[in-house]
Image (tube, helix red, strand yellow):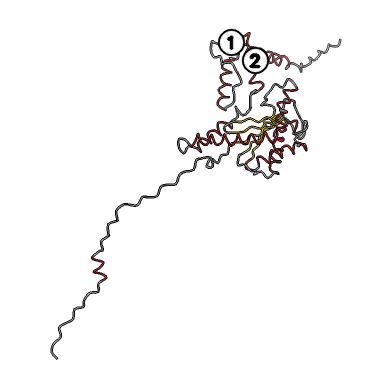
């Protein structure tokens, strides 16, 4: 009778899956526990963010005071949008000159140049005011029809003169090329401003409508290109290039709301700032000449001659030896 053969047991080649599954489960449980015990202190996070922002001279990103410690906001208010003030969202509604960094720099420069005597500063500022007032009258006469139509606005200040021109009469939509009529208009401006020593700052502004072309990727480039077009025209009109400077503000200095067509039309503009001349020597009162020294009423005392000098100039008498009898 034949013996039964024992079946060989098959080796289990997937035994590694069991410890691997246990390891993955343990890792998952570990990270779940770590996430559960961790908590973000929002007050400390905002404090660190604000300190870094102030260290790099950046404006604070949060308008509310930073909450640290136990005086934190309730969780119901965390994550809600913070209302932004109208001035921070839409920019200044007044003239952009008022908050421009040019104002303190210009005033400091003008006053430091005029620190000669007590009345020179007031006299120089008054002379600047009169010169800019006369210039404003000349510009208003040269552009009378545009001023009456509110397409050009002339504003006066002690240290500068602001000429605001609506961009619609200068450039087509989305372009920085001056129209033929715009060249004629700016040519009349150039006749008045060409021979003056005053520096001129040309500023370009746009509305908030986005633009994305190969030539103008954003409103920054469009506003700067429009200001540069005015600068190039003035240079072709024989302006001294060192008198001119240009800047583009894009859409971020609106003077009106961009929610209406009238507001967007008002925000599309080019501003010419005619600054007071930095050469204050012509504005100072002339310095009177120094008085001549007075002649004394009595004659000057005679200067005695040196006896020694006389003795030197006198020839000495030679001593002759005594002569004997011949």
Q: Residue furthest left?
A: 325
Looking at the rendered image, the quarter that the C terminus falls into is: bottom left
The vertical placement of 84 against 281, above or below, is: above
Percent of width and height locating residue 99: 60, 27
| Residue shown at 63% from the left, 24% from the top | 94
Q: Residue furthest bottom?
A: 326
- Of badges 2 and 1, the one in the foreground is 2
Name the side, left or right, on which 188 lies relative to 197. right
Badge 2: residue crowd in 10 Å (few <14, some 14–19, many ≥20): few
Residue 223's image quarter? top right
| Residue shown at 57% from the left, 35% from the top | 130
Percent of width and height locating residue 212: 76, 30
Report helix, strand or loop for mark 1.
loop
In the picture of the structure, the residue carrying the numbered disc 1 is 73
In the picture of the structure, the residue carrying the numbered disc 2 is 83
Q: Nearer the viewer, residue 198 or 79?
A: 198
Percent of width and height locating residue 166: 72, 30
Looking at the rendered image, the quarter that the N terminus falls into is: top right
The vertical placement of 236 against 170, above or below, is: below
Residue 142's image quarter? top right
| Residue shown at 35% from the left, 52% from the top | 295
Residue 168's image quarter? top right
* Disc number for residue 150: none
Percent of width and height locating residue 102: 59, 32
């Amino acid at each position: 009778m034949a013996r039964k053969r024992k079946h060989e047991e098959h080796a289990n080649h997937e035994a590694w899956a069991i410890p691997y599954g246990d390891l993955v489960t343990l890792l998952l449980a570990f990270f779940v526990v770590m996430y559960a015990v961790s908590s973000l202190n929002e007050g400390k996070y905002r404090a660190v963010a604000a300190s870094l922002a102030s260290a790099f001279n950046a404006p604070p990103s949060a308008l509310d005071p930073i909450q640290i410690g136990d005086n934190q906001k309730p969780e119901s208010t965390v994550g809600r949008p913070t209302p932004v003030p109208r001035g921070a969202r839409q920019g200044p509604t007044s003239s952009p000159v008022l908050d421009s960094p040019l104002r303190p720099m210009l005033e400091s420069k003008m006053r430091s140049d005029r620190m000669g005597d007590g009345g020179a500063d007031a006299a120089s500022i008054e002379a600047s005011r009169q010169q800019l007032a006369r210039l404003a009258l000349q510009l208003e006469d040269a552009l009378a029809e545009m001023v009456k139509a509110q397409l050009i606005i002339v504003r006066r200040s002690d240290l500068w003169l602001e000429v605001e021109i609506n961009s619609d009469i200068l450039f087509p939509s989305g372009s920085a090329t001056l129209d033929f009529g715009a060249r004629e208009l700016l040519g009349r401006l150039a006749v008045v401003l060409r021979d003056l020593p005053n520096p001129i700052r040309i500023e370009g502004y746009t509305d908030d409508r986005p633009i994305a072309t190969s030539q103008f990727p954003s409103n920054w480039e469009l506003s700067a290109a429009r200001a540069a077009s005015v600068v190039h025209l003035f240079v072709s009109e024989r302006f001294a290039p060192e008198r001119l400077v240009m800047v583009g503000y894009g859409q971020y200095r609106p003077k009106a709301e961009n929610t209406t067509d009238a507001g967007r039309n008002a925000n599309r503009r080019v501003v010419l700032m005619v600054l007071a001349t930095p050469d204050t020597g012509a504005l100072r009162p002339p310095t009177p000449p120094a008085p001549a020294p007075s002649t004394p009423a009595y004659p000057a005392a005679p200067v005695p001659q040196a006896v020694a000098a006389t003795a030197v100039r006198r020839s000495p008498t030679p001593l002759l030896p005594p002569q004997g009898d011949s």
